[in-house]
Image (cartoon, grey):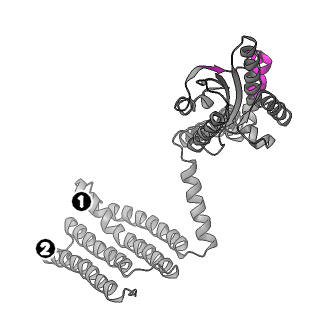
Amino acid sequence: MLLVLCVDLDDDLGRKTGFETPVTGRDAVEESAVALATADPEDSDVNVIFEGVHLYDELVAEGESVEVAVVTGEAAGDVAANRKVGNEIDRTLASLQTGEDVRAVVVTDGAQDESVIPVIRSRVPIDSVRRVVVRQAQDLESMYYTFKQVLDDPETRGTILVPLGILLLVYPAAVIANVLDLPGSALGLGSALLGLYVLFRGLGLEQSVDAVAERLRTALYTGRVTLVTSVVALALVAVAAVRGDASLALHSADGPGAPLETVAAVAYGAVAWIAAAGLVAAFGRITDEYLADSFHWRYLNAPFYVIAIAVIVRALSAYLLGLGFATLPYLAAALTGGTLLAVSSTLAFAVAESRLRPTTS
């Protein structure tokens, strides 16, 4: 016995018509095709079901023992859809009143539906697979219609039209800049925007940027201190860059020094401001953790670590620059003091956390 099996992997039939699947029998299958065509004439699964009915009639005319059925999956995903198709095939096979071996002829509308063929083959041997291609798809009119449908999709429209629009705006921007006797930055700016957009889309950064924006929005509306302290910390880092540059200019007034001295000069001028930025950011994070009832004593290590690192870097950079007060004993004392501060804070807060940890009965 041959089973003509029409596959609707994303369950357009069930979602758009309310038909319970699997649908078995020529009359029921034809009725479901008419219902789907009425609900959505553009759905390609309409052609699949009608092709199943047509194939059933051809095989019956040739004297074959035939049955036709429609099985559907789910729109949620491949695994769930394949599992549902398998279950409906099992139910269809169980409903066939025949003592003959059953073989299948699978009818689909493309490669996506054909991905379920291994699931079908695990339950019934497959004689052939027929893919339904609408004949009008070869015409120019249908190509235009398909292109129009693609551009109606928001995701496709953003991917194709936005870079094209930016590209077309580059030349007018350059002409306007030339007429207004402006610098040739317009063309460069347009090209840079296009390049950034292409990189943005190519690297798939949309979700990352959306996640960052969502975190910022959440922090803003839930009163997180970290949002303010982060802004202050960034401002302090900017000041640190300025101070590092000023320190470099001061210590290289007699000419450029060795690379190590250059790094030391920048670090000497910037380290105090960077440490201040680190302290502000750390206290903001500690405050938010405390307010969220997720505070741990070890979080208090961060400010002490920042101070310890700042003391060590400041002393080392002063020693490398040969400043008068930065003698070898001074450097040794700074290194020892910074190390002891970090170790002491770690031990102290570890003991505090172990002693003050709430006990559970």
Q: Identify the image quadrant of residue 27.
A: top right
User: Which amino acid type is marked by label 1?
Assistant: Glu
In this view of the protein, which residue sits in the foreground, 300 or 261?
A: 300
- Location of residue 124 in the rendering, given as x and y in whole percent from the top left corner: 56, 28
* Residue 36 belongs to magenta span: no
**Most distant residue in the front direction:** 99
Q: Is residue 321 above or below residue 143?
A: below
The residue carrying mark 2 is 328
Which residues are drawn in magenta?
Answer: 128-148
> Who's the residue at 60% across and 61% down the image?
214
Q: Position of residue 85 (x, y in %)?
A: 62, 38
Q: What distance separates the C-alpha of mark 1 from that of mark 2? A: 17 Å
Q: Return the residue found at the far right.
A: 38
What amino acid is labelled 2 in the image? Answer: Leu
Q: Residue furthest top?
A: 62
Q: In the rendering, which numbered label is found on residue 261?
A: 1
Identify which residue, 279 or 95, lies in the foreground: 95
